[in-house]
Image (tube, rainbow, N blue to C red):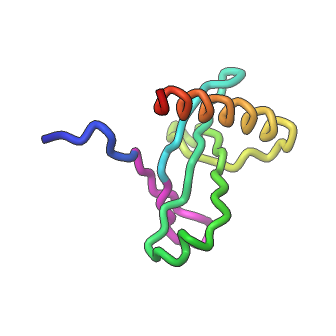
Amino acid sequence: MENDFAADLITLVDEENVEHQFEILDQLVYNDTEYYALYPIFDDANDAVEDSGEYYIMEVIDVDGEQQLAEVEDDDLLDELAEIFEKRFEELFDDEEE
């Protein structure tokens, strides 16, 4: 039996070559650029409990024909994207409650 509610996971490698796993909460295209809202996945339950609950917004960029994710550098753009994602999360949460 297939689970339609399984989380979409992605693994990213940082500058120090350390892998980090994230759940893809949502994705959108804004001003012709694709963005992802990512929530970290923790191996240790204590780390999850101590986490602030914040998610990350990453921009899809093209590096030599390969898609990669990068941090959003522009604070104003990041605020705009966070507002859009938060609204989408609220709408999704409201739909699930009904």
**At x 46% / y 76%, what residue is drawn?**
44
**At x 54% / y 34%, what residue is drawn?**
93
Say which quarter of the image contains residue 64.
top right
Secondary structure that dominates the magenta span: strand
2 left or right of 61 in image:
left
Q: Nearer the viewer, residue 77 or 33?
A: 77
As drawn, the residue found furthest toward the right would be 76
Count of picture labels? 0
Q: Where is 65 relative to 56, above or below?
A: above
**At x 63% / y 52%, what residue is drawn?**
55
What's the magenta region?
8-22
In x, y percent, where is residue 85? 66, 34
In x, y percent, where is residue 73? 79, 47
- Figure quadrant of the N terminus: top left
In x, y percent, where is residue 91? 59, 27
Q: Nearer the viewer, residue 38 or 15?
A: 38
In x, y percent, where is residue 51? 62, 68
Say which quarter of the image contains residue 33.
top right
Q: Nearer the viewer, residue 75 or 62?
A: 75
96 left or right of 68 in image:
left
As drawn, the residue found furthest toward the top would be 32
Q: Is residue 19 magenta?
A: yes
As drawn, the residue found furthest toward the left would be 1
Q: Where is 48 relative to 12, above or below?
A: below
**At x 44% / y 51%, what residue is drawn?**
10
Q: Is residue 20 magenta?
A: yes
